[in-house]
Image: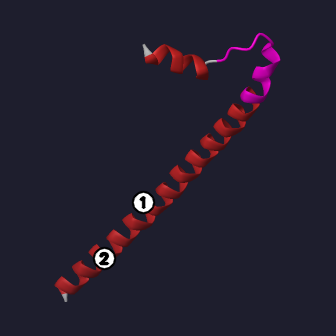
Amino acid sequence: MFLPSVLSMFLYFPEDKSEYIPAVISLTIFMIGAVFTMRFIIKVSKREAQKAKEFEEQLKNQDHTQRNS
């Protein structure tokens, strides 16, 4: 009833396919940005995990030396 008439307002398939070019360009730009952002977040996360591991080892060593003293 109501659904097909609402969907028909949002669906538009142009006859001139050159109208897709700006959409493809912006999609490409945003996808490249998303990939770089994801890689950056993963790199920072690995760096933070390494720092946390080093800090944990440092705390274990301090605890171990205090128990032996």
User: Secondary structure under badge 2?
Assistant: helix
Relative to 25, does residue 68 appear above or below in the rendering?
Answer: below
First along the sequence among labels 2 and 1: 1
Residue in the foreground of this view, choosing between 64 and 32: 32
Q: Quadrant of the C terminus?
A: bottom left
Decide if residue 18 is on the left or right side of residue 12.
right
Residue at image location 61% in from the left, 40% down from the top? 35
Relative to 5, does residue 69 appear above or below in the rendering?
Answer: below
Decide if residue 12 is on the left or right side of residue 53.
right
Question: Could you tell me the amino acid type at mark 2?
Answer: Leu
The crowd level at tag 1 (other Cα within 10 Å; few <14, some 14-19, many 20+) is few
User: Secondary structure under badge 1?
Assistant: helix
Residue at image location 58% in from the left, 52% down from the top? 40
Residue in the foreground of this view, choosing between 13 and 30: 13
Location of residue 34 by image quarter: top right
Q: Residue at label 1?
A: 49
Q: Is residue 15 magenta?
A: yes
Q: Quadrant of the N terminus?
A: top left
Horizontal and vertical percent position of residue 42: 51, 50
In the image as oriented, which residue stretches furthest toward the bottom? 69
In the image as oriented, which residue stretches furthest toward the front? 1
Relative to 44, does residue 55 appear above or below in the rendering?
Answer: below
Location of residue 10 by image quarter: top right
The crowd level at tag 2 (other Cα within 10 Å; few <14, some 14-19, many 20+) is few
Question: Could you tell me the amino acid type at mark 1?
Answer: Ala
**Which colour assignment does the render follow?**
secondary structure
Horizontal and vertical percent position of residue 62: 29, 81
- The stretch of residues the image draws in magenta is 12-23
Distance from disc 2 to disc 1, alpha carbons, whole Å, reads: 15 Å
Q: Which mark is residue 59?
A: 2
Horizontal and vertical percent position of residue 24: 73, 27
